[in-house]
Image (tube, rainbow, N blue to C red):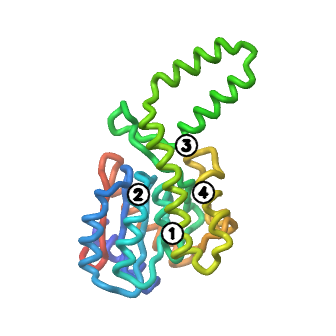
Amino acid sequence: MDEKKRKELLEKLERIRESKVIVYFSYTPLDDRILVPLYRELANIGKTKKIDLFLYSYGGAVDTPYKVVMLIREFCENFSVIVPFSAKSAASMIVLGADEVVMGPISELGPIDPLVKHPCYKDFWIPVQALRCCFEYIEEMIYNSSNPEVSEIIMNSVLSKLDPWLIGDYEKALKASKQYAESLLSKYMLKNDKEKIKSVTHNLTNGYFSHGYPIGRQEAKEMGLCVTEASGELWETIWELYLIYQSMFSAENCCIFSLSTIG
């Protein structure tokens, strides 16, 4: 029943949006493994006027979103992202390369603080900003300390556990996220409103302390993003489709790609 209903909802969403809809629904970090199945689905569609990416992801690698946007735009004139619930971090970066983002009352974007694999713990990803916050905390602690010897011991203990090559790589990831954001905004979402690019990029890369901060549709709109507020039949269709995908896949599953046109 869910499979039949899912296809019906995808077809309905395509009729409402006058688009071809691709779904990416994932509980695992976004990385380059998305590219081959994405290309396969796009090749099945062929060149078309408008593509909507129905996106649920909590983010991932810093370089992948740019590749995703460039690949999708090879196949369409107009590209939009539909966010039923969460499109955070690297997934929010994909949004910056769209012409619009479609959001409902519960939809969330997030800061584009890239995730990196922890050097010691397998399959454990951390936000790069966490490292910078660590250094800022140590610096503040030393500055305010009444016992510099104790502060120095703590600082040396922390630094001895850090690989300078990794620190440099993490810093590059932060700079890359800013570069990608500015590039995508200038080419696509804010191409006609370039004076907002710097402020939007700054807000998304440096404006929030929490990696999971929820940027709802009103805040996204106030920030300067091109937001379409989904309501009525459109939102009901988006939300019902999200609930079906949520019921189909547990946190142990990697991801799903689907097209209404091929099932």
Q: Residue type at mark 1?
A: Leu
Vertical position of residue 129 compared to residue 138: above or below? below
The residue indicated by pointer 2 is 63
In which quadrant will I find the C terminus? bottom left
Give the distance between the C-alpha atoms of the residues marked 2 and 1, in whole angstroms.
12 Å
State which tag comes first along the sequence, 1 or 4.
1
State which tag comes first along the sequence, 4 or 3.
3
Task: Estimate how packed mark 1 is, as few (under 14), some (14 to 19) or many (20 or more) residues with alpha carbons within 10 Å.
Answer: many
- Of tags 1 and 4, the one toward the viewer is 1
Circles 2 and 3, Cβ within 8 Å, touching? The answer is: no
Label 3's element?
Answer: helix
Name the disc covering residue 52, or none. none
> In percent of the image, x 57 and y 38: which residue is there?
132
The residue indicated by pointer 3 is 129
Task: Estimate how packed mark 4 is, as few (under 14), some (14 to 19) or many (20 or more) residues with alpha carbons within 10 Å.
Answer: many
Give the distance between the C-alpha atoms of the residues marked 2 and 3, in whole angstroms.
16 Å
> In percent of the image, x 53 and y 63: which residue is there?
181
The residue indicated by pointer 4 is 204
Give the distance between the C-alpha atoms of the residues marked 1 and 4, in whole angstroms.
13 Å
Give the distance between the C-alpha atoms of the residues marked 3 and 1, in whole angstroms.
21 Å
Q: Is residue 1 visible?
A: no
Label 1's element?
Answer: helix
Residue placed most toward the observer, 157 or 88:
157
Residue 226: x and y, percent? Answer: 60, 74
Q: Would you identify the image quadrant in which residue 125 lies? A: top left
Residue placed most toward the observer, 86 or 32:
32
> In percent of the image, x 47 and y 22: which residue is there?
160
The residue indicated by pointer 1 is 184
Vertical position of residue 45 compared to residue 32: above or below? below
